[in-house]
Amino acid sequence: MLYTNLKHIETAADHAKIISENENVMVICGRMGPMCIPVYGIAEEIENQYSHVQFYDMEFDNPESHVIRSLSEVKGFMGIPFTIYYKNGKVAKATSSIQTIEQVTSILNQEYGNAQKS
Amino acid sequence: MHTQNHFDVIVIGGGPAGLTAGIYLSRARLKTLILNEGTIGGQMVLTHEIANYPGVENINGFQLSNIMKKQAKTFGCEIRSNIMIKDLILDKAVKTVILSDGTIYTSDSVILTPGGRSRTLNVEGEDVFKGKGISYCATCDGDFFKDKEIVVVGGGNSALEECVSLTKYVSKATIVHQFDHFQAFQYAVEEASNHEKINFIMESSIVAFHGNENLESIDIKNLRTGEISNFKTDGVFIFIGYVPNTEFLKDKIKLNQWGEIVVNTDMETDIEGVYAAGDSIAKKYRQITTSVGEATIAAMAASEYLHKKQILQFTKN
């Protein structure tokens, strides 16, 4: 399990349940490495401002994360984390490798609507 | 009269140095704000295992960073991360920090701990193929390049050691380095030189990345002849050292030729009331422990500075 302060997805079944029951879900699938940790940090930082989005992580080396690794949208990705933005259970956007807060918030704003300051 | 956004000390940077300064200052009952542009913990969070931090047997950087952050907050330190600094005024008695979202903070003293970051090549296509063939971390992305041919850029210990570690996955690795010799230790040079999967292109640098969905080739410039040739590759790993995050301090405080902040033994910069610590200062050894020590000195010197300033104001009145 990843030791971030985000909520963790540990099974494919949980993953399916979460994306089917929530309209807006962002899942960061990675390891505790230098390209991934900054993205978890960004998600932790902005989580409260995007209360209409559910933020999760999933361990890349967990066999259950095949649900993300086998997505057609990540074909060709060669850098972790794979960050998947789901809208109504479908992939709206996917990114590979480290991202800046501007890149993340730009996608969140575009796909889910702007931050709602808490 | 000071506003709610006025602090005794503003610490810029939230790595081990910044968090240590935050702990010491807030414990001394000084109103303290840490402003951090990236992830709290800085380079420390990227360390998988820390085995030489005194008093802690074994911990990873992310956990140590979380403990330091919690400690600082417990003492009342305020922390804002993932912000962007638009401007700062340091050469006045009251220091001002302006964020890109328009928020203005002021303080009587500032401690600069912006740390450093991995250097990038900054050439055409680098941003486009990041995560699609370009990587800065062998441990993270090595397994995506199984049986593929890759290029490693750099000539220091990291480049050579990471290249050797990547040979577990790749069929062939070519090291591209700008000089005719390596900066790495001899053992690392020998290990790479003797490895059957590793080749070298010396006195050369990458000037462009090309591909469609993924990286397919690079342009390599021979720095001696100026000739540019195209080189097919599945991936490029870049290990070309670190740079201090001090661009925003240019023309505001004294920096050396490498952009590092120049400080005295009290961690004081050339501006009164402004101190610095951590990986962004001019120094030889960059360790978590050295950053923590420097930040302790900076915090205590800043406290003393504020105390003297208050006494001076009191005697004037």
Image (cartoon, helix red, strand yellow):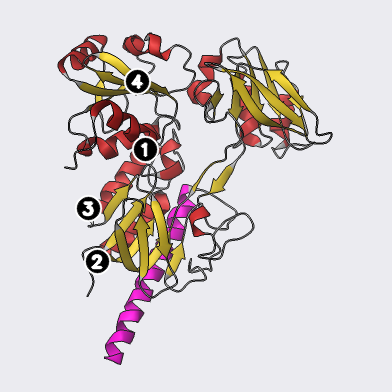
Q: Is residue B3 above or below residue B84?
A: below
Chain letter for mark 1, please: A
From the image, tell me which residue sits under label 4.
A93
Q: Which residue: 41% across, 59% down?
A: B87
Q: Counting other residues with Cα less than 10 Å from the Cα at mark 2, is it few (<14), some (14-19), or many (20 or more)?
A: few
For disc 4, the neighbor class at 10 Å (few under 14, some 14 to 19, many from 20) is some
* Res. B58 visible in picture: no
Residue B276, image x, y percentages: 46, 61
Q: Is residue B303 magenta?
A: yes
* Cα–Cα gap, marks 3 and 1: 26 Å
The residue to which callout 2 is attached is B29
In the picture, residue B111 is in which quadrant? bottom left
* Res. B110 image quadrant: bottom left
Query: Which label was assigned to residue B135?
Result: none
Q: Amino acid at mark 2?
A: Arg
Q: Is residue A77 left or right of residue A93?
A: right
Front label number (4 vs 3): 4
Callout 3: chain: B
Depth check: give the residue in front, B249 or B75: B249
Q: Which residue is found at the position 56% from the left and 11% from the top?
A: B146
| The residue stretch that appears in magenta | B288-317
The tag on residue B74 is 3
In the picture, the disc for residue A101 is: 1
Q: Amino acid at mark 4?
A: Lys
What's under tag 1, amino acid-wise? Ile
Q: Where in the figure is residue B223, as x and y percent of width and height?
A: 78, 36
Q: Residue at x 75, y 22 (%)?
A: B194
Residues under numbered marks 4 and 3 in contact, where contact means CB atoms less than 8 Å apart: no
Coordinates of residue B159 in the picture (x, y in percent): 63, 32
Determine whether the residue tagged by mark 3 lies in a helix, strand or loop: helix
Are the numbered discs 2 and 3 placed on the same chain, yes or no? yes
